[in-house]
Amino acid sequence: MYTNRFLLLLILVTSPLLTRAQSDKPVGGHFGVKIGASFTQVAISGTSVNIPKRALQPNLGVMYRYRYHRVVLQPEALLAIKGGTFQQEAVGGRTTTSNSYYYACLPILLGYIPTEGLTLQAGPEFSYALNSGSTSGPGAQNDLGAVVGVHYDFLDMLSKMSLHLRYVHGFVNVSPEAGATYYNRNVQVSIVYNLYPKKKKK
């Protein structure tokens, strides 16, 4: 519920700043750097003493965005923390432990521009765990997920900035427990600084 309220508030606050894409050339590409936050949680099924809870974790990386009229190809390289927090029943109450799964991620997104300033995106995300096998790490080294989201472009003083909102749904069981399955679930909110090519002087 808190995640939904945060996303709704973020959209309402930023919507007056949204306009046509600043990289509105019908054909061309540029690089960008991004930083943001992930609302991350593990979906657990089977037999486990862990009760999954959501955690707020950072993400950062780079992207390349290539536009061909209304179609966009956008590969990225990210460092992201997935996992979440787990609660366990104990005498006198519950205990909470943090399980941070550190990943190097490669999302490859295909997008469509229905109107200037807005891109609908989807694609696979390949992830490699940097701390698999550790006490607080995932049980599997690789993860494969599906990404759906949107890309907004700002204008005026924020003309080099964009906003990414996306959901990442993991398909690989990353559980360290034999009797349970763990799947990564993430909602990401990121700000992008676009490195647009300099305009050539006429």
Image (cartoon, rainbow, N blue to C red):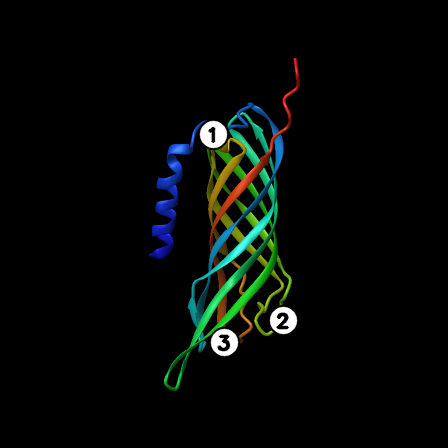
Residue type at tag 3:
Gly
Residue situated furthest bottom in the rendering: 91
Disc 3 to disc 1, C-alpha distance: 51 Å
Q: Is residue 111 above or below residue 96?
A: above
Disc 3 to disc 2, C-alpha distance: 17 Å
Provide the secondary structure element on which disc 1 rests: loop
Left or right position of 132 against 94: right
Q: Nearer the viewer, mark 1 or mark 2?
A: 1
Nearer to me, 202 or 102: 202
Callout 1 crowding tier (Cα within 10 Å): few <14, some 14–19, many ≥20: some
Nearer to me, 166 or 93: 93
Residue at image x 63%, y 71%? 133
Residue behind mark 1:
155
Residue type at tag 1:
Leu
Nearer to me, 180 or 66: 66
Residues at discs 1 and 2 in contact (Cβ within 8 Å)? no
Earlier in the chain: of badge 3 and badge 2, it is 2
Earlier in the chain: of badge 3 and badge 1, it is 1
Residue type at tag 2:
Gly
